[in-house]
Amino acid sequence: MTGDTKAAAKYTLRGTAVTARVGVALGVAVTICFVTGLISHFIQHPQPWFFWPTRPVWLYQFTQGVHVISGIALIPLLVVKLWSVYPKLFERPIIGGLTRQLERASILVLVGSMIFQLSTGIMNIAQWYAFKFFFTTSHYAMAYVAAGAILVHIGVKLPVIRRALGEPLEEIPTGELMPHRGPSRRAVLGGTWLAVGVATVLTAGQTVSWLRHVSLLAPRSGQGPQGVPVNRSAWAAGVLRSAQSPDYRLTVVNGGNSKAFTVAELAAMPQTTHRLPIACVEGWSATADWTGVVLADLVKAVGGSPDSDVRMISLERPGPYSRTVLPARHARDSMTLVALKVNGQTLDLDHGYPCRLIAPTRPGVLQTKWLTRIEVVQ
Amino acid sequence: MTAIRALLVLAGLAVGVYGALLVFDHSTQDVIRIVAWAMIGVLLHDAVFAPVCVALGFAGRRILPHKWWTPVLVAGLLTVILVLLAIPVYSKPGLHLDNLTVLDRNYQAGFWAAVAVVWGAALLYLVGDRLLPVGQNQVVQQQGPDHVDGQPPSVGAGGQQGAGSGEPDGER
């Protein structure tokens, strides 16, 4: 960084006062993004200690929306944070001692993992898989690398951070200070918060519906068949024929006890309508009126226990998302439906016709579509 | 303080090593791809983006009048963010014809509209700046948050009726 004598003679826009303030915002956003990301991970990979409630029904819509929004907000924060320390890139000596090498290595890990997380995240929400590795596992692993590197960085820089936050943003004018007629540090910080706001407004409409019309760069407008966007089409899932087959049956199994239902038989059962959000891991969400049979009624029809988990199996060929296990808490919930209709219309093929799971507080990817079999887990 | 720092560094190392182990759970080919992606990101930033920003800043300070620097700096930052956000959607590289609910906006029009609004606002700021009394902005921009102007000299016994020239507010 600029030496003290030089700083007294020349006003610099960069400085630890700016770096530390943007750094605090960055730290807060990373924490939010990391925690909401972990929540989404543990819903999809349940652990015995992890508890995920069924109310409020919009809980996952909220946490995952916040995950993507805070991730996008991190982009301007990271750009400005790195800009504020550009002089370090050209610092001499280039090699230096062991401590310097270690510090540089930790910064390399920090910057590399942050760029990795933000670039893969924003590409994933636009379904652009130019990278050839698997997104979810690599994004999850690198989240820990980034979080660890940030903790180390804060540990190393703590005295500098404390000092910088205690000092005024602008250098105290002295007689030696060159007359300054350009932008101030306050303008840099103001511009940063403005950039965060603009990035949020331009993309958050896929989660916050009233921002839809101004979210010009959101990967989704929120439109879709029957007013609900689609993540995986019936064509991509390879179920066009099987879903429309007259031989279609939904089989519900509890050990040796099983029952098969035609679409007409499902429609003849007592129907319930609930207003529930479908919230994708990619951050978009849409709330709709879903109508169908309460899952607990189907489980009861084969003598299943309300304390059992329930496996939902799709017509889709076996793959990572063709089957899910619904925890007992969600399976017995009165709002969990095997839906036949959305917004008053028979489900579109792309929404899972003939029937799909819709449960509160679950990621969209686990709301199994084109259901063919429901098994009470013994 | 030393204890807190040591704790942060140790916790960071533990979390980071756990992440590295998770990375190494991938196939060797994928580990190479993951590390390469991160390092190419750093390289693009350090060797391309940062020098370009420094060069633009250097040139801008010499070419543009002082009054332009603040709006151009802020509009420049916003433009960089718009470009970064537009990259994955501008030409719709992730579009699949079986699902038209993804990438279903006119992103090119949206991007250029946003750029136009940003630079239009910068221009408005410049015009507004020109309409302000000369010099006021530059004075205010150098003041810290704790800045309080000197109080007006008291006039006679009822000195509070001064001309109000010492008003510290009204910075905007």
Image (cartoon, grey):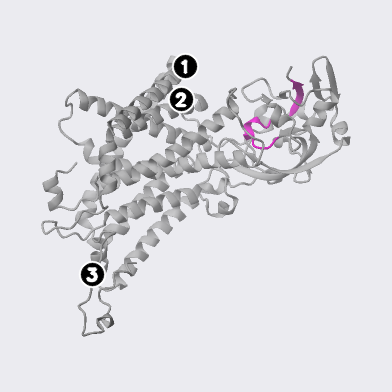
> What is the chain letter for disc 2?
A
* Residue at position x 43%, y 38% in the image: A30
Helix, strand or loop at label 3? It is: loop
Q: Is residue B40 visible?
A: no
Q: Are marks 1 and 2 in contact (CB under 8 Å)?
A: yes
What x and y, as percent, mark residue B157? 23, 84
What x and y, as percent, mark residue B114? 45, 54
The quarter of the image holding the C terminus of chain A is top right
What x and y, as percent, mark residue A375? 76, 21
Q: Determine which of the numbered discs, if any, sits on residue A219 in the image.
A: none
* Residue B170 figure quarter: bottom left
Mark found first going from the N terminus, 3 or 1: 1
Task: Please check the rendered image and state whether residue A83 is part of the magenta-colored stretch, yes or no.
Answer: no
| Residue at the disc numbered 1 | B25
Q: Amino acid at mark 3?
A: Gly
| Residue at the disc numbered 2 | A141
Other-residue count near label 1 (Cα within 10 Å), few / some / many at <14 / 14–19 / ≥20? some
> What is the chain letter for disc 1?
B
